[in-house]
Structure formats: C-alpha cells, structure tokens
Image (spheres, rainbow, N blue to C red):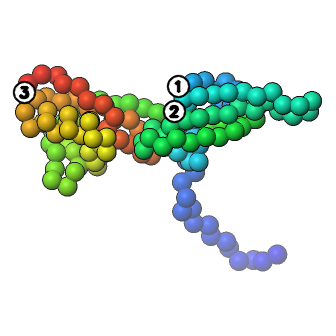
Amino acid sequence: MSDEEHQFESKADAGASKTFPQQAGTIRKNGYIVIKNRACKVVEVSTSKTGKHGHAKCHFVAIDIFNGKKLEDIVPSSHNCDVPHVTRTDYQLIDISEDGFVSLLTESGGTKDDLKLPTDDALLTQIKDGFAEGKDLVVTVMSAMGEEQICALKDIGPK
C-alpha cells in the first residue's frame, strides 16, 4: 500500500471504566442501566416471551439519576447492557460561592471546588438555609460516567 506513517489522534475517551456489561435478563428494579448514554435507575422491568425462534425481550423504564428524565429501552434478555459504576461520597460543606459552586472538604483534607449547587429546589433551599444558620453540613455526592451531582444532605450539628 503506502509507505507513509499514519498517526492516529485519540480524541475520544473509551469510557471503559465508566460502565460494565451485565446480561439484560439479570437487571432488576432499583438497579442501574445506561440508556442513551445516560446513567439511569430502573423503576420498572417487564419481560416478554416472543415466538418460536425469537428472543425474550426486557422492557426497561428508568429515570436518569442526574436530571430526572424518564427513559425507556427494549433489549433481548440474552444480550448485554451497560451498567454504570455509581458511587456515593460524603463531603463536608465549607463554602457556597455567589456563582453557585460549592467548596467541599475531602477525606484527605483537600478541597473540591468543581461542583455546582443541586437543581432540586427543596435540597437547594435546605443547603442554603443550613449553611446560613452556620450548621455543619455533610453533602452526599453521586457520581457516574464522569458526571457528579449533590443528591443528599446530612446535618451533623452546629459548628
């Protein structure tokens, strides 16, 4: 063919560690699944038996764990689905900046300043009110597939 050297630039992340494969038939309600490249929590699973030579199919109804949108997918039960690695980490709240970012204290004693306040109004007012009252607040951050969001709040008493 040609004697030229080809150079490939990898611009996309393979995303290998963000998800793991799991057979569709083994995914249950309250489990996690990736639908349309979004990490979702399964709220309903129904399996349908098909004809003589077909596959049984699983119908998943799931809610995006970050924006709350409802997504649906139908997959043959013998096929593999992507399941996101979902982790929850607790951080102590240090500060809330005017532009909506929070400053959090990590386990190692460093700070994490790249998270925005949650979009959920009830949680947002709880965080702002508790912080204004000078309470020691611990927020739970859920992360999956490179996205992070504050999902819960604990009050560990006054400062």
Q: Which mark identifies residue 159? A: 3
Q: Which mark identifies residue 30? A: 1
C-alpha span from label 3 to label 1? 36 Å
Quadrant in which residue 126 is drawn: top left
Give the side of residue 38 with respect to residue 58, left or right. Answer: left
Disc 2 designates what residue?
41
* Number of other residues with Cα within 10 Å of mark 2, as a class: few under 14, some 14 to 19, many 20 or more: many
Q: Which residue occupies the foreground of this view, 151 or 52?
A: 52
Q: Amino acid at mark 1?
A: Asn
Q: Earlier in the sequence, mark 3 or mark 1?
A: 1
Disc 2 is placed on an element classified as strand
Q: Is residue 46 above or below residue 37?
A: above
Q: Nearer the viewer, mark 2 or mark 3?
A: 2
Residue 121 visible in the shown view? yes
Q: Earlier in the sequence, mark 2 or mark 3?
A: 2
- Whether residues under marks 2 and 1 lie with C-beta atoms below 8 angstroms apart, the answer is yes
C-alpha span from label 2 to label 3? 35 Å
Give the side of residue 95 with respect to residue 119, left or right. Answer: left
Q: Is residue 68 above or below residue 114?
A: above
Quadrant in which residue 134 is drawn: top left
